[in-house]
């Protein structure tokens, strides 16, 4: 009998899983049910779309529709009947499954403020999570001169930079004492605020919003210190919450997310969960690299390609996708304790670097502005390699030999195991192997390896490696 796999959610995790299943041999019927009306799209690139650096068609993801994948957009699943092994859709259809996958993602948090009804937000008040949100923000910018962004985390700042690029006087309101407090220390936050000011983004720190009033002419945001800020639109960027409603109603174990084991199984062996809705080992990921890694493991397990495949979290590197602002943050770079700490700050140039080292290994770093060593630092962190004895060279990005080679500087010196694409976990060695297998252009290498198809931040590095390969007479690849 053909195995029936039903995937709830056609987001970045669900669409990737469908593709992974499609790519593996075997007789199975895969049904993907997606509540959003569109084809699957790259949610990460919404910040770039908002900034006007790409167009809507550029965010589409290639899907595995047809060939055994039944893809249904605009279909919301309203209930899971575990005893009958069926899901029910909004229009009353019942669809049976042998294995069910929850890939329901997360929803934007709408803060509980007077004037904000999550079910009925004013036209000029928009969260930033979906393509429809992005369209609404862009519609509201038409003829607008000013914008407010509530929330100074990563996405709030990407939104603010994008709105400023479109010529809007933009103010970020953040309740904490410094920006991106989950990733940055206070000094880095202050340097970043200075950089943003240069792009026309004002920052109001350490003040909470107390209410919102909005009509067709604009928005007023009331603050706890008695002030009110006015603008033509308000973007809400107050975090996300895993979408666990279906799992909860079906009686699965849910903490902050749907609890899964290393095989991505929930408390029901016939149901798995991946992506933003899943909680693995007490951790919610909220990023695409783990979601795609989980999709790969689950496809291996479900199809029997590798029944022993297990999801193992990798170190996370966060990068801000905002034109003119280079920011990478990884691990725990906070101060205190016996660890070795190295810092360099040049606020007038918007540059800041902080490295935290324990037992000769990098356990955290913040690199803001012009930091030539960023590629090296990411590789050292990612691979847990010993740091070079010349700490100053590492901090300031001077020549470091083999370990310090960035792809753009010298791909020849990069170790083959170095991860070039963080979103898809693609190493330099994998890029070289795709070249050797016949991929001769950047597009062909990208198609063969998927490098560059996540946030796109490694595209220059991939191009650099392809250029180097096309010039090199012979390339020795070691594993
Ligand atoms: C603007 C923006 C920028 C980002 N930038 C980055 C970045 O640079 N790097 C990074 O790693 N991550 C980034 N992220 C986070 C990243 O997009 C998420 O981690 C990723 O989308 C998670 O994929 P997912 O499939 O789990 O969830 P989602 O992509 O949210 O997809 C879940 C899908 O399930 C659907 N769904 C939910 N319930 C049902 C139901 N009952 N029936 C049917 N369908 C349902 C939803 O409609 C949605 O389409 C960004 C997010 C945003 C919003």
Image: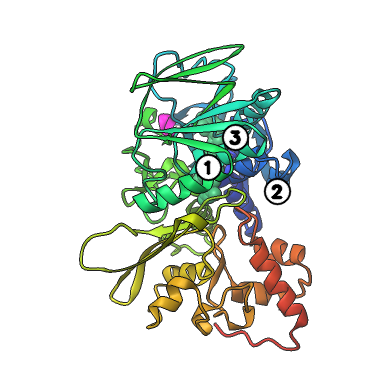
Q: Is residue 251 above or below residue 5?
A: above
Q: Which residue is denoted by mark 2 in the rendering?
A: 62
User: Could you tell me how far apart the alpha carbons at marks 1 and 3 are, in whole angstroms?
Assistant: 43 Å
Q: Residue at x 46, y 36 (%)?
A: 203
From the viewer's perspective, tell me whether residue 320 is left or right of residue 187. Answer: right
Q: Secondary structure at mark 1?
A: helix
Q: Earlier in the sequence, mark 1 or mark 3?
A: 3
Instruction: Tell me residue 200's x, y (percent).
Output: 58, 38
Q: Residue at x 64, y 72 (%)?
A: 408
Q: Can residue 358 be seen from the camera position used here?
A: yes
Other-residue count near label 3 (Cα within 10 Å), few / some / many at <14 / 14–19 / ≥20 = many
From the viewer's perspective, tell me whether residue 418 is left or right of residue 312. Answer: right
Q: Residue at x 40, y 34 (%)?
A: 247
Q: Quadrant of residue 389?
A: bottom left
Which contiguous range is marked in magenta? Answer: 242-246
Q: Is residue 319 above or below residue 255?
A: below
- The residue mark sitting in front, 2 or 1, is 1
Residue 326 on the magenta segment:
no
Mark 3 vs ligand 1: CB below 8 Å: yes
- The residue mark sitting in front, 1 or 3, is 1
Q: Earlier in the sequence, mark 3 or mark 2?
A: 3
Q: Which residue is denoted by mark 1 in the rendering?
A: 197
Q: Quadrant of residue 110?
A: top left
Q: Earlier in the sequence, mark 2 or mark 1?
A: 2
Instruction: Tell me residue 241's x, y (percent).
Output: 41, 34
Q: Residue at x 38, y 27 (%)?
A: 249
């Amino acid at each position: 009998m053909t195995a029936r796999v039903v995937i709830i959610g056609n987001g970045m995790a669900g669409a990737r899983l469908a593709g992974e299943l499609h790519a593996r041999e075997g007789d199975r019927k895969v049904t993907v049910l997606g509540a959003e009306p569109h084809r699957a799209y790259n949610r990460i690139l919404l910040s770039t779309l908002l900034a006007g650096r790409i167009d809507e068609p550029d965010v589409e993801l290639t899907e595995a529709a047809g060939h055994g994948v039944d893809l249904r957009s605009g279909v919301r699943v309203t209930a899971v009947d575990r005893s009958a092994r069926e899901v029910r859709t909004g229009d009353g259809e019942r669809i049976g499954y042998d294995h069910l996958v929850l890939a329901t993602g997360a929803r934007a948090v709408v803060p509980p403020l007077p004037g904000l009804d999550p079910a009925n937000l004013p036209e000029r008040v928009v969260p930033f999570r979906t393509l429809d949100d992005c369209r609404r923000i862009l519609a509201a910018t038409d003829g607008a001169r000013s914008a407010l962004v509530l929330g100074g985390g990563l996405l709030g700042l990407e939104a603010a930079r994008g709105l400023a690029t479109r010529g809007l006087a933009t103010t970020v309101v953040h309740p904490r004492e410094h920006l991106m407090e989950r990733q940055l220390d206070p000094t880095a936050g202050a340097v970043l605020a200075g950089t943003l000011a240069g792009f026309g983004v004002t920052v109001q720190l350490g003040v909470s919003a107390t209410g919102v009033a909005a009509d067709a002419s604009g928005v007023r945001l009331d603050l706890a210190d008695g002030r009110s800020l006015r603008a033509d639109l308000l973007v809400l960027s107050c975090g996300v919450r895993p979408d666990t409603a279906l799992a909860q109603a079906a009686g699965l174990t849910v903490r902050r997310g749907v609890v899964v084991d290393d095989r991505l199984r929930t408390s029901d062996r016939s149901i798995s969960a991946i992506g933003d809705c899943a909680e693995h080992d007490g951790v919610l990921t909220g990023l695409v690299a783990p979601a795609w890694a989980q999709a790969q493991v689950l496809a291996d397990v479900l199809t029997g390609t590798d029944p022993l495949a297990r999801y193992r979290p990798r170190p996370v590197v966060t990068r801000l996708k905002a034109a003119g602002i280079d920011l990478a943050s990884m691990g725990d770079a906070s101060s205190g304790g016996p660890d070795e700490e190295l810092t360099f700050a040049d606020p007038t140039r918007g540059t800041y670097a902080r490295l935290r080292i324990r037992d000769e290994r990098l356990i955290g770093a913040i690199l803001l502005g012009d930091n030539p060593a960023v590629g090296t630092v990411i590789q050292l962190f990612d691979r847990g390699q010993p740091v070079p004895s010349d700490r100053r060279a590492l901090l300031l990005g001077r020549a470091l030999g083999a370990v310090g080679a960035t792809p753009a500087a010298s791909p020849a010196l990069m170790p083959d195991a170095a991860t070039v694409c963080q979103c898809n976990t693609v190493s330099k060695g994998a890029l070289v192997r795709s070249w050797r297998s016949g991929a001769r252009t950047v597009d062909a290498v990208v198609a063969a390896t998927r490098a560059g198809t996540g946030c796109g931040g490694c595209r220059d590095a991939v191009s650099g490696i392809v250029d180097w390969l096309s010039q090199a007479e012979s390339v020795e690849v070691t594993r």
